[in-house]
Each structure stands twice: as structure tokens, then as C-alpha cells.
Amino acid sequence: MSEPNKIEISTGTILRVMLLLLASWFLYVVRDIILLLFISVIIVAAINPVVSWINRKWKVSRTIGALFVFAIIVALVVLAVSFIVPPVITQFHEFSKNAAQYYSGAENWLGRTGLTSLAGNNVGTLSGLSGNIFSTTVGVFSGVISAVVVLSMAFYMSIEEDGIRQFIISVMPEKHKKYASNLTVRIEHKIGKWMLGQVALMFLIFVFDYIGLRLIGIPYALTLAFLAGLLEIVPYVGPIISAIPGIFIGLMISPVEGVLAFLVYFIAQHLETNIIVPQIMKKAVGLNPVTTILAILVGFSLAGVLGALISVPVATALTLFAGDFMGRN
């Protein structure tokens, strides 16, 4: 009589599983640090081509080139904060004070169409949603210490030739160094193109929406355009969400203003889909839109707004690694 099959697990296998679980737990504990590190990598990937160009063109050290690029970035951020954030805050407070007036207008206008109850159920929700989005956005930029840490790591990685690749290689086992080097170069290339393309896309949508809403006389045009620019990071869904407040405010003024506001957002979305994205983004990342949205939702659930912001680069890196892994099996 044959003996039943026995499943034997070696001590080495048990130890490897325990080490894997321990490493997973450790990564979860230090996830905030890893998040800051990855943000630094994204910044370096975006500015590295500029630093390298300055190094070659002007024959100066990478340190000087990196200092110059960071000085420009800091100056642009300070200018943006000085010129955009205070008016946005002022307009947001004005909108909060006038919310009752817009609510009354919504009841009068929707009452004629038999949709008064719909307004009663959703106007307050929309107002609360705007407040949450704004407070969350401001909270992202309130971590001064985290920002200093991120910029410091990004600076030190950018002053070294192939700083990201050298860092990744330094923490990898010897037998995986060659593959890690190749993968890092590809990830850095894609993330850099995505970062620059995304910033350009958000800026262009902000400018177009602001000009369009201002021309047709929609109040709080700067705040609405700022929201539209921020939500451009979420494909398909973001532009729709950002259009709702502007169209709603336009309808409270008059049906004609509401239609004009809709046309502004519609034209912006059409230009983005057919002209801006193909010209700027092209095949920078190559992620399926559904995959992108899921990555953003997962990133937000794990690490809040910052997690959502870096979710696309992380998904891009994982996709490249998964493609290599599947290709070898």
C-alpha cells in the first residue's frame, strides 16, 4: 500500500516567507517615507533632462545646473502662490457667503421645471464637496517639512549623473543590479515625460477655462479654473466633476449663462482630447484609462491626496516590471 503524498516545507522556505512578511510589514510602517522618496524621484525624472542640457550646453557642473533649475521652480511656485492662491481663497469665501443666494436661485429656477426637490437634495452636497476639495488641496501644500525633505532628496539625486539609477543600484542585490539599472532608466524616462506633460496639460486647461469663464461673466472664474486644472490629473472623470460647479453657477444667473458655461467646458474638453493630449502626452505613459482611474482610487485610499498624485507614475513602474516578468515566464 503506497503512502499518501506528503508536502514538505523546508526551513529555508519558511524563513523566506517570514522575511517577506517582515519586509512587507516594514514597508507599510515606513510608507510615508517611501511616498516622499517616490515624489523626489518623480521630480528628478522631470528635471534631469533640463539639468543635463544645461550641463552640456553651458559647460557648468550639474550642481550649478540643478541649483538654477530649482531656483526657477521655487520662483514659479512663489509667483503662483502669490498671484493665484489669495484670490482663490477670497473667491471661495465669497462663494460660501453667497451660497444661500445661489440656493434660492436654484429653487426658483428648478421650481419652474419641477425639480425643486432635486435642488434641495444636491445643492448642499455640492457646496460641501467644494469645501472638502479646497481644504484637502490646501492641506497638501501645508507640509513644509515634508516639502523641504523632498526637495533636498531630489536635489542630491539630480546633481549626480544618473542619480536615480545609482541610488536604486546601491540598494539592490548584486545579481539584480543589471536588470534594476535597465528598468530604472525606462521608468525614469516615462515618468519624466508624464510629469512634464501633466503639468503642461493642467496649466493649459486652467488658462483656457479661466479666460472662457471670465469672458462670459461667470463669477469665481479663477477658483473654478483652478479646480479644473487640479482635477485634470484624473482622466475623463476629473473634467466632468470640475465642470459641474461652473455650469451650476451659470444656471443660477440665467439659462443662457449656464449654456455658455457648458460650452466653455465642452470646448476645453474637446481641445484636450483631440489636440492637447495627443500633442503633449502622446505615448508618455501608455496606461489604459480604466487602469489609470483605478490606480488613482487605490492611491487615494492608501495615502490620501499625495497617494493619488503619484499613483499614475507608480502604476507605470509596476506595469513595466509586470511586463518584464510576464515576458520571462
Image (cartoon, helix red, strand yellow):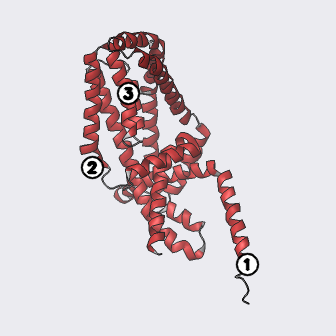
Residue 282 place in picture, x, y as percent: 30, 53
Look at mark 1 in the image and give the residue it sits on: 10
Give the residue drawn at x 72%, y 79%: 8
Judge left or right: residue 300 versus residue 206: right
| Marks 3, 2: nearer the viewer | 3
Taking depth in this image into account, of 124 and 274 the one nearest to the observer is 124
Q: Is residue 48 visible?
A: no
Residue 184 place in picture, x, y as percent: 48, 64
Give the crowd class for mark 3: few <14, some 14-19, many >=20 residues within 10 Å: some
Q: Secondary structure at mark 1?
A: loop
Look at mark 3 in the image and give the residue it sits on: 244
Give the crowd class for mark 2: few <14, some 14-19, many >=20 residues within 10 Å: few
Cβ atoms under marks 3 and 2 closer than 8 Å: no
Residue 10 place in picture, x, y as percent: 73, 78
Cβ atoms under marks 1 and 2 closer than 8 Å: no
Disc on the earlier residue, 1 or 2: 1
Look at mark 2 in the image and give the residue it sits on: 278
Count of labels shown?
3
Q: Secondary structure at mark 3?
A: helix
Q: Is residue 306 visible?
A: yes
Q: Residue furthest front?
A: 1
Q: Amino acid at mark 3?
A: Ile
Residue 108 place in picture, x, y as percent: 36, 9
- Quadrant, the N terminus: bottom right
Give the residue drawn at x 36%, y 21%: 248
